[in-house]
Amino acid sequence: MLLEVRDLHVEFTTRDGVAKAVNGVDLHVDEGETLAVLGESGSGKSVTAQAVMGILDIPPARITGGEVLFQGRDQLLLKEDERRKVRGAGMAMIFQDALSSLNPVLSVGDQLGEMFRVHQGLSRKDARAKAVELMERVRIPAAKERVGQYPHQFSGGMRQRIMIAMALALEPALIIADEPTTALDVTVQAQVMDLLADLQREYHMGLVLITHDLGVVADVADRIAVMYAGRIVESAPVHDIYKAPAHPYTKGLLESIPRLDRKGQDLYAIKGLPPNLMNIPPGCAFHPRCPMAQDVCRTDVPDLFEVSEERRSACFYWRETLHG
Amino acid sequence: MGRYVIRRLLQMIPVFLGATLLIFLMVNVMGDPVAGLCGERQCDPATAAQLKKEFGLDKPVWQQYLTYMGNVFTGDFGTAFNGQPVTELMGSAFPVTIRLTIVAIVFEIVIGITLGVLTGLRRGRPVDTTVLLVTLVVISIPTFVTGLLLQLLLGVEWGLIKPSVSPDAPFDELLVPGLVLASVSLAYVTRLTRTSIAENRRADYVRTAIAKGLPRQRVITRHLLRNSLIPVVTFIGTDIGALMGGAIVTERIFNIHGVGYQLYQGILRQNTQTVVGFVTVLVLVFLVANLLVDLLYAVLDPRIRYA
């Protein structure tokens, strides 16, 4: 197993109180596997990713419990300097908004080359050559001419390719992509996603794809983990989940996708709002919005029940949901 | 870029003419320029008339201005009333003030930026609060108070420095005056850097730099500082002109025979040619410094392109 997160807890101390962003996340990724982490804004997907990478802002954030095992080593126990060497080389991250995530005053060649200069001690010239090679690998035309240009001189899609190239530079075993296509035009989204999927296959990397776009997930993911209020509420192989969800929240998400065969009908929406992380409802966090909620849901926190060997659901009524 | 520079240089002409005309008029309404020559006594009318004719002061002001500007462009800034060419005064005064300005700017850069980075990264902690308080005190106290206080303490009481700078004004004697001259700007540089660093340290590209596995040192200097210094450099650049012309108080306190000192003497003795000459050069320094800052801006931030 490449990455295993066990019972991760993250809190944020804010002026108004403590926000519990991640409340016991368990997930795992194998080599060459794509795991999609699905959830609304504020469900804790990005915070989980940043905790795994070790780039949380501490404080205000605080990891209050859990383990992050990467290639067998608990990252949370490593010294900062050891952890730094894993970042970029062992696991890398692709961010959502490439324009703000790239440094505006350094050329893309400098920013790509920096990976080789810092981690491998290459000379400026060799690093620049490697940067061109990377740009070609993510199919940026005229890479040799454009290597000296700055991020604002590239289009949105090209910039996101540069982000991908940067993550790919040292051929890490794991890439975490945090909504890599959200900031792009729909037409460009598919190209970038295909590129990412191709490269992942080529390098046999583990990929954690954080998204709220169910359409993207269906095409590229092997498994899906659905997050709600800082917990995984369902995890399953992609086909199983689309065929029959085992958690009312997942079911609600799937039903709110617009479908051509239901043209003219009202679009389904999950009623209510995601919970305030400073005041998460007792019992199952989803119960105030859940059409199936019973008394037990309001008092007891459901375990992550084993639906099948590869499938888990954090719902007392997963059987009813699955078959109903 | 080339076209931009040419346009800016052309824009300087009206600014330069306007500024010099203003100062020329102001100095002329200041009082009777020949009165100062006769010292305490009232000038005898015949001598006054003769002097006026000699210096061309009997002609109308606009004609005086044209003659003056014509001379300036041939490098003749006129003669002070004591017979010394103004260019000679400049030759002795400007090197001294330039040295003083360099000392001040180095203090601003080294101390101001260091403190700004330190406090910006530790916003809200005791270091930050202390430094912020000190900068506020420095900004509130007028330069002549800090100057006289330091002169009294370091120079007279403790004898660590010479209370007045010798005529050559070597760099080591200019350290304390330079610090006094820099003090207020230094406090501003600290605050500006602090705000800029604190604002940018949560920027996405800083997070990217950390995610790339770069050492903290490199994240701060290459990514955070590079971006945060853009407004600071602009401030320091514009400050060069202000420091050169604004050293009057500091130069008086430490008896430095620089531009400020000569200007002060010129105004005191109603020495038109000296005052106008020095101010003219200061106007030029200011204009050129501003142009250089704008050009530097484009170098620091590639998103800015002048067309």
Image: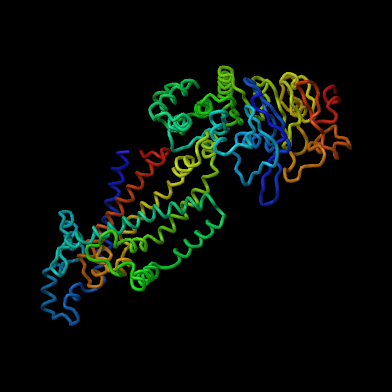
Q: Residue furthest bottom?
A: B41
Is residue B65 visible in the rendered structure shown here?
no
- Looking at the image, which is closer to me, B56 or B178? B178
Taking B270 as reference, is A124 left or right? right
Q: Give residue A60's position: percent from left, percent from top.
A: 63, 46
B90 shown above or below B228: below
Q: Give residue A321's position: percent from left, percent from top.
A: 83, 26
Q: Assign the C terminus of chain B to one quadrant of the image.
A: top left
Coloring scheme of the render?
Answer: rainbow
Q: Assign the N terminus of chain B to one quadrant of the image.
A: top left
* Rendering quarter of residue B247: bottom left
Taking B283 as reference, is A317 left or right? right
- Looking at the image, which is closer to me, B295 or A300? A300
Is residue A174 visible in the rendered structure shown here?
yes
Q: How many marks?
A: 0
What residue is drawn where x is 33% and y is 70%?
A: B159
- Looking at the image, which is closer to me, B161 or B284? B161
* Rendering quarter of residue A51: top right
Q: Give residue A186's position: percent from left, percent from top.
A: 59, 25
A155 shown above or below B61: above
- Looking at the image, which is closer to me, A59 or B14? A59
